[in-house]
Amino acid sequence: MPLDRLDKLRAEIKRIEGHTSSLEEVRADRFAEQSDPQSNLSAAPAWSFGEMEVDQCLGHGLAPHALHEINPLAYKDCWAALSFALALSSKRACFDQRPLLWCSSRASKSEYGGLYGQGLQRFNLDPARFILIETKNDNETLFVLEEALKSARLCAVIGLIAAPGLTASRRLSLMADKGQTPALLVTKPGDTGIKNATTRWQIAALRTDQSLFTTPSLPQQILPQLAWQVALTRNRQGPADKKWHLEFPSYEQPLHKSSQKAFRFALPSPFRNRKSKAAA
């Protein structure tokens, strides 16, 4: 169909629907649709940790359209890896209001657990924003993750899965770039790693009573209860083999009373007063 006739039809449809757009406005809308659809996403704030030392290693933040692996150091650290993935998702969800996808197989859910609505509020995440999918096995999980990334309609895609092979991980990486959507894959302890991952984080739990520092600048309703020992073992954005102790604030009040500005990762400072174990 010629473009002139197509534009006239669009103008007529808008008129019938109650809009008074002219033919010139319809053509302008069509021209905007044909332009780069990701121009608005490129202007979005950086997906950063909020700590200069970590962000500089990543080129001022995590790559927003790439594949990132989160691996527990040992079996006992699986919950820490899951919470770290949610913390990263929370940082991105602050400026991207689209839904988040959480996908795992039945075996992974029975072994590592699933999401809990009230628990998500500790990360300042609204449970209503999550799309939960349970699959039969890891092959189905791979299919769901690939289709979700391809849709380009999600804030982030989080999957619990054994480290996929080279071909499968390559496809996920390509779909993440094509759909302009990040993928956070929480793999199993002992996995050798995802070859096409942009970053690989090895996570170990850090007991809160062993916290290396306090955060007096946080509001009283925010308690630093989430802590990890983090090792960046793979990094295509900069140097690797970096280790940090990171803490993340935990919200105890409803979402509408939470302060987004204080919701950030924190590093220990040798010059900051530390509480003794007995005092804590």
Image (spheres, helix red, strand yellow):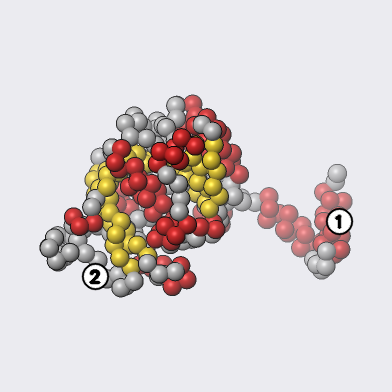
The residue singled out by tag 2 in the image is 216
* SS of the residue under disc 2: loop
Residue 223 location (% of width, % of height): 30, 65
Looking at the image, tell me whether mark 2 or mark 1 is earlier in sequence order: 1
Q: Looking at numbered disc 2 in the image, what kind of residue is underneath it?
A: Pro
Dot 2, crowdedness within 10 Å: few (<14), some or many (≥20)?
A: few
Residue 21 location (% of width, % of height): 80, 66
Residue 104 location (% of width, % of height): 49, 40
Q: What residue do we see at 77% from left, 59% from top?
A: 26
**In the visual, does 12 lie left or right of 226?**
right
* Residue 65 visible in this rendered orientation of the protein: no
* The N terminus: image quadrant: top right
Outermost residue on the front side: it is: 110
Q: What residue do we see at 34% from left, 71% from top?
A: 221
Residue 178 location (% of width, % of height): 56, 41
Pair 2/1: label in front: 2
**In the visual, does 14 lie left or right of 193?**
right
* The C terminus: image quadrant: bottom left
Tell which of 251 and 26 is nearer to you.
251
The residue singled out by tag 1 in the image is 8
Q: Quadrant of residue 161?
A: top left
Q: Is residue 113 above or below residue 227?
A: above
Q: What residue do we see at 37% from left, 41% from top?
A: 70
Estimate the spatial distance between the alpha carbons at disc 2 and disc 1, rounded to whole Å: 62 Å
Q: Looking at numbered disc 1 in the image, what kind of residue is underneath it?
A: Lys
Q: Is residue 182 above or below residue 267?
A: above
**In the visual, does 249 lie left or right of 38?**
left
Q: What residue do we see at 42% from left, 57% from top?
A: 119
